[in-house]
Image (tube, helix red, strand yellow):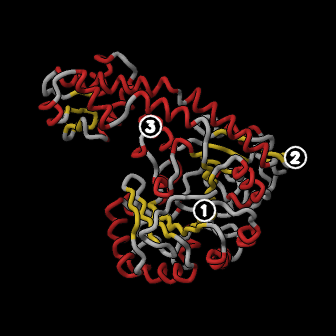
Amino acid sequence: MKNRFIVDNRITNEFVETYTKTTYRIIGKNKHSSIKPCHWLEQRLMTGRNNRNCYKDIFGINSHRCLQNTPSLPFCNHQCVFCWRDIEAGSLGSEFSVEPDEPKEIISEMFRHHQDIIQNHLPLRRYLDNYEIMIDILYYMLINGESSHTLNSLRNKIHVSKNKIERATNLLKNQNFITPISHQVTGFKLDDDIRRCINSREEIEVLINRALTTPDEIMQAHSEAMIPNHAAISLDGEPLLYPKMSEFVQEFKNRSMTTFIVSNGTLPDKINDLKPLPSQLYITLPAPNEQIYKQVCRPMVKNGWKKINESLELLNSLSCRTLIRLTAIKNVNINNTYIENYKNILKKANPNFFEIKGFTLQAKALSIKDRLKSNKELHYYFPDYDFLEDFALRFEEISGFPIIYKNRASRDFLFAVNWDKDKDPKITKL
């Protein structure tokens, strides 16, 4: 079927324009690659501290130095119900059907765009201002007694934009320096302990410096972010469809960068041919059996489940670190009756790690119940942290694979499979 977004073996500007209102940057002459700074990169820029990292922190990856990218943005052979992309309108097919750009040129452009984003769209001044605004907010709330404050009242008193007030209050709220008023979503009050113990603006600044950040840490993080040292080849599409993946990984290695590849596992021959291998290879395990696989992934490839299992069989022979990820959908691919299925798959594949991660409820993933042709409410499918923790603990008990890391914000649980649970999992080589 002819796609209007591909003309003369090239992706058209019309396709690129569908991403112009997002933080995607389309990269390269033939427009099949992209970068996108993730939520956690900006979180790290706000404070510069390790506690603002994503779940990859367990592997020693710093979010502000992570280049989230893909060389295969519009191409994927799955139409997963949990995908946040506009796959019904935006996917250009299950095969890489345009002329591939050269890896060296792609990566040079990725760096150029990344540095432009850091300098001009996530600028240092924003986060230094945020530091001052947080102090202003706490001091204003301190001197105004026990009254509550809304975003609008804070904006009027602090004299900055609503966006800046929201950014600062979100960070203060996450730190429990301010707390929401019951039944009043936009209302806040100062934490009682701070009110009792703090008496001046200077003491508020000391508190911020101890618990959250300092200007020096913000400036250092922003400077470091200009030079990424990790490539997360995971943004969108199926990256192994890109025909020059080995050269792509090598180019990152030439820049002394670690690399993660996240694949759906349907291309075992591509995995077998990867030279060099990435620092860590992820294979997404979407289901406990073929029936649920077809329901969850809606594959556009023949024998997809068979190919995934062929990829899993390769893992034990690879010289790189390996991880099987279960992207969890409540009441679809995760419940206690499937524990034995997953345990048997893991024992056979013998990866270094197994990860259970709740699917991300954002963008087009909000349409998951429509994709499943369901009349259930959205919460029926969304696995919150407590639900996942219950399942993870039960899985740990039955499988014997120990949990070595939990991340509440990412709803992520990491198990050691072919890995000493007492050994540090941080990446030590490219």
Q: Earlier in the sequence, mark 2 or mark 3?
A: 2
The amino acid pointed to by label 2 is Asp
The amino acid pointed to by label 1 is Gln
Going 60% across and 49% down the picture, which residue do you hit?
230
Cα separation between marks 3 and 1: 25 Å
Cα separation between marks 2 and 3: 46 Å
Q: Nearer the viewer, residue 120 or 353?
A: 353
Q: Secondary structure at mark 3?
A: loop
Q: Pointer 1: what residue?
A: 280
Q: Which residue is at the far right?
A: 8
Q: Pointer 2: what residue?
A: 8
Categorize mark 3 by other alpha carbons within 10 Å: few (<14), some (14-19), many (20+).
many
Residue 83 visible: yes
Where residue 368 appears, x then y in whole percent? 49, 58
Q: Are marks 1 and 2 in contact (CB under 8 Å)?
A: no
Going 61% across and 54% down the picture, which residue do you hit?
234
Where residue 45 appears, x then y in whole percent? 47, 36
Q: Pointer 3: what residue?
A: 48
Where residue 266 appears, x then y in whole percent? 67, 70
Cα separation between marks 1 and 2: 36 Å
- The quadrant of the picture occupied by the N terminus is bottom right
Going 76% across and 46% down the picture, which residue do you hit?
5
Q: Image height check: is 100 above or below 347?
A: above
Going 55% across and 70% down the picture, which residue do you hit?
285
